Image (spheres, grey):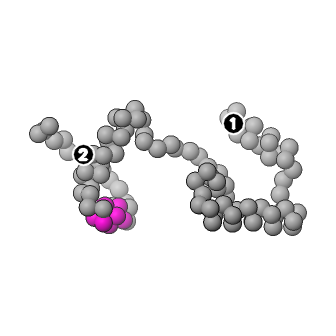
């Protein structure tokens, strides 16, 4: 494919600079990274990653490192011992209501 198309995108300067620094270390030009992203959009027929709204303060333990997981478990134990927390029925109801919204 000899033809090219130009894309103009506005991003925060700090985001661009940070991404460029990482891409430079990888030896990948920004234009190639954008091209790879767009090819992944085509292959996935959507964004190549999930978009989720996670309430602040909630950690996705599926993506946590082992150290972060153990820290969260420890924090939960400490909260439980100190009487900080919610009854299971209240938590269950909260998730039920959130999934129906």
Residue at image coords 30%, 62%: 26
Q: Position of residue 8 (x, y in %)?
A: 26, 48
Q: Position of residue 88 (x, y in %)?
A: 84, 47
Q: Tell me the CA gap for discs 1 and 2.
A: 38 Å
- Which circle marks residue 99 in the picture? 1
Tell me the quadrant of the picture where the C terminus can be found: top right
Q: Position of residue 90 (x, y in %)?
A: 84, 45
Q: Which residues are magenta?
A: 17-25
Instruction: Note whether 18 is above or below 92 in the view shown.
Output: below
The foreground one among 101 and 59 is 59
Residue at image coords 62%, 62%: 66
Secondary element type, mark 1: helix
The residue wearing badge 2 is 7
Residue at image coords 58%, 53%: 63
Inspect the magenta stretch and tell me whether residue 57 lies in it: no
Q: Residue furthest left?
A: 2
Q: Position of residue 80 (x, y in %)?
A: 84, 62
Secondary element type, mark 2: loop
Mark 1, mark 2: which one is toward the viewer?
Answer: 1
Task: Please say whether residue 13 is visible from this viewpoint.
Answer: no
Q: Does the magenta stretch mainly form a helix, a strand or a loop?
A: helix
Q: Is residue 1 left or right of residue 74?
A: left
Tell me the quadrant of the picture where the N terminus can be found: top left
Task: Please say whether residue 33 is visible from this viewpoint.
Answer: yes
Crowd rating for badge 1 (residues with CA inside 10 Å; few <14, some 14–19, many 20+): few
Q: Is residue 15 left or right of residue 35?
A: right
Q: Residue furthest front?
A: 66
């Amino acid at each position: 494919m000899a033809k090219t198309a130009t894309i103009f995108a506005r991003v925060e300067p700090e985001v661009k600079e940070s991404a460029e620094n990482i891409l430079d270390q990888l030896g990948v030009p920004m234009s190639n990274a954008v091209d790879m992203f767009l090819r992944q959009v085509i292959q996935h027929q959507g964004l190549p990653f999930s978009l989720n709204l996670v309430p602040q303060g909630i950690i996705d333990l599926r993506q946590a490192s082992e150290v972060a997981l153990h820290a969260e478990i420890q924090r939960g134990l400490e909260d439980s011992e100190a009487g900080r927390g919610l009854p299971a029925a209240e938590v269950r109801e909260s998730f039920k209501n959130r999934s129906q919204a």
